[in-house]
Amino acid sequence: MPLVKCADCGTEVSDQAPACPKCGRPIATHVTERTSRRIKSHVLGAVFLMIVGPITCMAGLPSHAGGDPNMYFSVFGTLAFLGGLTWYIISRFRAWWRHG
Ligand SMILES: [Zn+2]
């Protein structure tokens, strides 16, 4: 369990503690904010992949009727989308796991 220094009185407090036991300054809140910001950046990355995936798939579609779609674009786009979806679910799950 890592210790953090209270910004007000300098007492070493567990970062899991809701507040400094000496002066009562809240401790856990800014830790939670930092965690949720990291989760947000994960969600943003996942959403980015979920947007880029279908665009890549469409970019691989034939420009003329009857042509074959580009396999590399289709496969890459599908993988990017599925990866982003999995990433998104894991990020949401971890946020739920940490914060209930
Ligand atoms: Zn304190």
Image (cartoon, grey):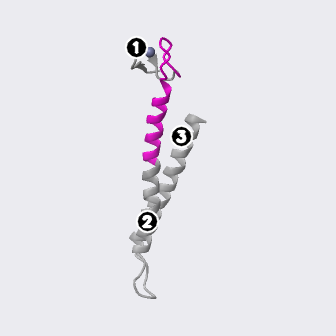
Q: Residue furthest bottom?
A: 65
- Which label sits in the foreground, 1 or 3? 1
> Residue at image x 43%, y 58%?
49
Residue type of the residue flagged with mark 3 = Arg
Residue topped by disc 2: 77
> Residue at image x 45%, y 30%?
30
| Magenta part, dominant SS | helix
Residue topped by disc 1: 9
Residue topped by disc 3: 94
Chain-order first, disc 2 or disc 1: 1
* Displayed quadrant of residue 94: top right
Q: What is the CA distance from the residue labelled 2 to the residue labelled 1?
A: 53 Å
- In the image, residue 1 above or below residue 57: above
- In the image, residue 39 above or below residue 63: above
Ligand 1 within 8 Å of disc 1? The answer is yes
Residue 29 is one of the magenta-drawn residues: yes
